[in-house]
Image (tube, grey):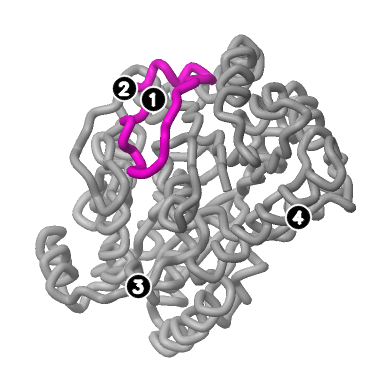
Amino acid sequence: MKLLFVADARSPISLSWIEYFVEAGHDAHIISTYPCPTDALRGATIHHVPIAFSWLSQINHNGATGNHTSARRNGPLASLRVGALSGLSLTMRSWLSPVELLRHVKKTHDLITRISPDVVHAMRIPFEGILASKSVPESLPLILSVWGNDFTLFAAQNPLIGRQTKSALRRANALLCDCDRDLQLAFADWGFQREKPTAVLPAAGGIKATFQKPDEESESLRRKQLKINESAPVVLNPRGFRQYVRNDVFFKAIPLVLNRQPETVFLCTGMQKNPVAEKWVTRESIGTSVRLLPLVDHDSMATLFRISNIAVSPSLHDGTPNSLLEAMACGCFPVAGAIESLKEWIVDGENGLLCDPESPESLASAILRAIEDPGLQERAAEINQRVISERAEYNSIMQRAEQFYGRVISRSHQAPGV
């Protein structure tokens, strides 16, 4: 198959998905909506159409990890996203970007026409799916991916994105969701037709076996680097700064945990040198118990999950976060916000704990329960290994995705334009 992906080619989630098709021998092209190295995924041809002010990003090469080129994001856009004005910048971007992307439609249309793929897959709705829906010729089938907050955050809270989302779903020939909740929302609220092909699959394609492989030497070294005692409980926040993650609640919960479990260490990825995170640490007087870490590459994240007892995600909006599946795969006990999509993976009190993501007391209570019940952690780890094997094993998921593409292409040949 000749495949064209409209995606942020810096995203490990996108790259993990596309990598399967490259290695399977398909002719893979990517229209990247963010600047990225031309060898971000070896074996794929990358074209650039920077939308949503992504041209403000700058990419520095840091070498390669596996088949992906590792890159560090910096520049004005990155600074705005993590600085004191991050909330304002995100709001402005969400209102201006739906208009700004319109100027890229002709270039994208011309690129797609020249590439002439068998199918186009836009990997999230804002703003790749919106751009693709306006650019893909009617003769070509279009698959849209819905990622965890496309409906519940962006489309629901921004009327312009909401209208563009409905328009994109009318144009789409098929839909991929990472949770059943979003599939039902697509039918009930956003006008996607039930007779069109659909599938519910993890956005990154699931978990690769290599991610789960223990490395005791690396884990021991990482503990020493982070100055963590062998007996100390370790709590990992892998979410970084996102508009829909209540990190303020997370930092307020830490003193409540430390009052009962003073040896606990908290690891926070993507927060090093972040003025907001540093302010919270200072305000709560928790500096000796918190490690603010930089953005961490995929392999290093596996090590962090394995040295941690608990992974927390006080999120208000999510589908199936890749970080949740990674935590489960590594035997790290999940504590997450009690939102509908996460209940598709976590049975509260069995293989994880669900809390009120807006309550420091609720989050702290769940963390403490997990720390103080090692048996619960052990039972959950066994359950989660089975869940990942049955529902999120990479090769199995991606074979289903490959079959789904074939079905969409075959259907388009039988009934053009449907």
Q: What's the distance in space between the residues labelled 1 and 2, CA to CA? A: 7 Å
Q: Mark 3 vs mark 4: which is more N-terminal?
A: 4
Q: Does the magenta-highlighted stretch encompass residue 37?
A: yes
- Residue that numbered label 4 is attached to: 198
Q: Mark 1 vs mark 2: which is more N-terminal?
A: 1
| Within-10-Å neighbours for mark 2: few <14, some 14–19, many 20+ | some
Q: Please state the horizontal and vertical placement of residue 296, each as a whole percent of the image.
A: 28, 49
Residue 253 lies left or right of residue 222; in this view the side is right
CB under 8 Å between callouts 1 and 2?
Answer: yes
Name the front one of labels 3 and 4. Answer: 4
Q: Mark 1 vs mark 4: which is more N-terminal?
A: 1
- Residue that numbered label 2 is attached to: 58
Residue plotted at (58% across, 48% down)? 1
Query: Which amino acid type is shown beneath numbered disc 1?
Result: Pro
Q: Which residues are magenta?
A: 36-57
- Residue that numbered label 1 is attached to: 35
Q: Mark 2 vs mark 4: which is more N-terminal?
A: 2
Query: Which amino acid type is shown beneath numbered disc 2?
Result: Gln
Q: What's the distance in space between the residues labelled 3 and 2, CA to CA? A: 32 Å
SS for tag 1? loop
How many labels sit on residues? 4
Q: Mark 3 vs mark 1: which is more N-terminal?
A: 1
